[in-house]
Image (spheres, helix red, strand yellow):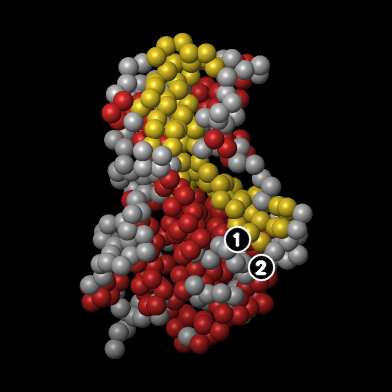
Amino acid sequence: MNTGKTIFSQVMDYLPMYDFRRCVQRYCGNYKVKSFSCWDQFLSMAFAQLTYRESLRDIETCLRSMSNKLYHMGFHGKVSRSTLADANEKRDWRIYADFAQVLINQARTLYADDDFGVDLESTVYALDATTIDLCLSLFPWAKFEKSKGAIKLHTALDLRGSIPTFIKITDGRGYELCLLDELIPEAGSFYIMDRGFLDFTRLYTLHLFHANFVIRSKKDIRFRRVYSHPIDKTEGLKCDQTIRLTGQFTHKYYPEKLRRVHYYDDQGDNDLVFFTNNFNLPAITIAQLYKCRWQIEIFFRWIKQHLRIKSFYGTSINAVKTQIWIAVSVYLLVAIIKKRMNIEMSLYTFLQIISVTVFEKVSIYQLLRELNCTNEGDDYPKQLKLFEL
């Protein structure tokens, strides 16, 4: 008989408890709490994410069915549906947002040397937002359209390891540009954006911070060509120009020179035009950087399909944000374990194994060795970095 820790306990052992306690103390999370602490709340919600629980009652039923193992899994309070609902409703979601930032820093350190498809030493971020539909009658604060509710996850993704470094949650009407207002630009880094972020005032702010950007252009941008650089048309390039904006207001919003790269994507049969403030990289590298922006679309699709962020256990904004940040923490935790244990399988496969073995008392190493898991039949064979071998 196995007398070791459960798989769930082994996974949770990778969490930095000192930092978690500091986050709880910062917002007085356990103030007047007698039995069900913030740690019990986090464990319950993390269990729900790892095992794909559908509701609070589902969480309660599963955990109570294994009540003899809960203490050894780290639980010190009785798990009930009403208590968990109250905790999600009342305890400050910033506790879990701050804790996620601790895990983000750990994950970025571990994945700092990973390749993301372009030979570049600088940090590269992809910026985008995704919408999660909600029922307006249940979530009246999440206004989107007249008869529809939604929230938006505005995300900055570090392409080395697909680590979300910044997340802002707004209602469905939140503009993508709000992400640029919240970010503190890093000098020397690259920010890759779609044309929804095309605002020359904000782009000029990035430029003043000595940050680089690559953004897709819109069709009606007026400019004057200053100089044309030589290109290799066999690579799909059509032009590489130095320009100045000549629009009525745009030339005031961005008074410096810009670089305009025109690239033809033969796979998608698309003409793509990019603006960038970087004049040092080859034009084909600028096009390749924008192509890597697709990694954030993969990230959004992955978390929607494999984490519980499309249906929520509570209807208040605090409960929704709590669930999202704990889901992000679980994603980061599994990514950290995968890297530290040198697990050569996709994140999806690793999560699936954990989901059906959380109560088993066997070493994770032994479990993976006995299963002899590979990536054969994985759902996303074309995913990059964190999602592949």
Q: Secondary structure at mark 2?
A: loop
Q: Nearer the viewer, mark 1 or mark 2?
A: 2
The residue pinned by badge 2 equals 314
- Calculate the distance from the C-alpha at mark 1 to the C-alpha at mark 2: 10 Å
In the rendered view, tell whether residue 281 sits above or below residue 162: above
Q: What residue occupies the far top of the structure in this picture? A: 226
In the rendered view, tell whether residue 96 sits above or below residue 295: below
The residue pinned by badge 1 equals 322
Task: Give me the residue at 30% from left, 84% from top.
Answer: 2
Label 2: few (<14), some (14–19) or many (≥20) C-alpha neighbours in 10 Å? many
Q: Position of residue 374 (x, y in %)?
A: 25, 67
Q: Position of residue 123 (x, y in %)?
A: 39, 36
Q: Quadrant of residue 89?
A: bottom right
Q: Quadrant of residue 34?
A: bottom right
- Quadrant location, the C terminus: bottom left
Q: Position of residue 251 (x, y in %)?
A: 60, 16
Nearest the eye: 361 or 72: 361
Q: Is residue 313 left or right of residue 208?
A: right
Q: Is residue 378 left or right of residue 328?
A: left
Q: Amino acid at mark 1?
A: Thr
Nearest the eye: 80 or 23: 80
Tell me, yes or no, whether the two marked residues, 1 and 2, touch with CB atoms within 8 Å: yes
Task: Give me the residue at 55% from left, 28% from top.
Answer: 219
Task: Give me the residue at 34% from left, 31% from top.
Answer: 236
Q: Secondary structure at mark 1?
A: helix
Q: Is residue 132 left or right of residue 236?
A: right
Task: Give me the residue at 60% from left, 57% from top.
Answer: 132
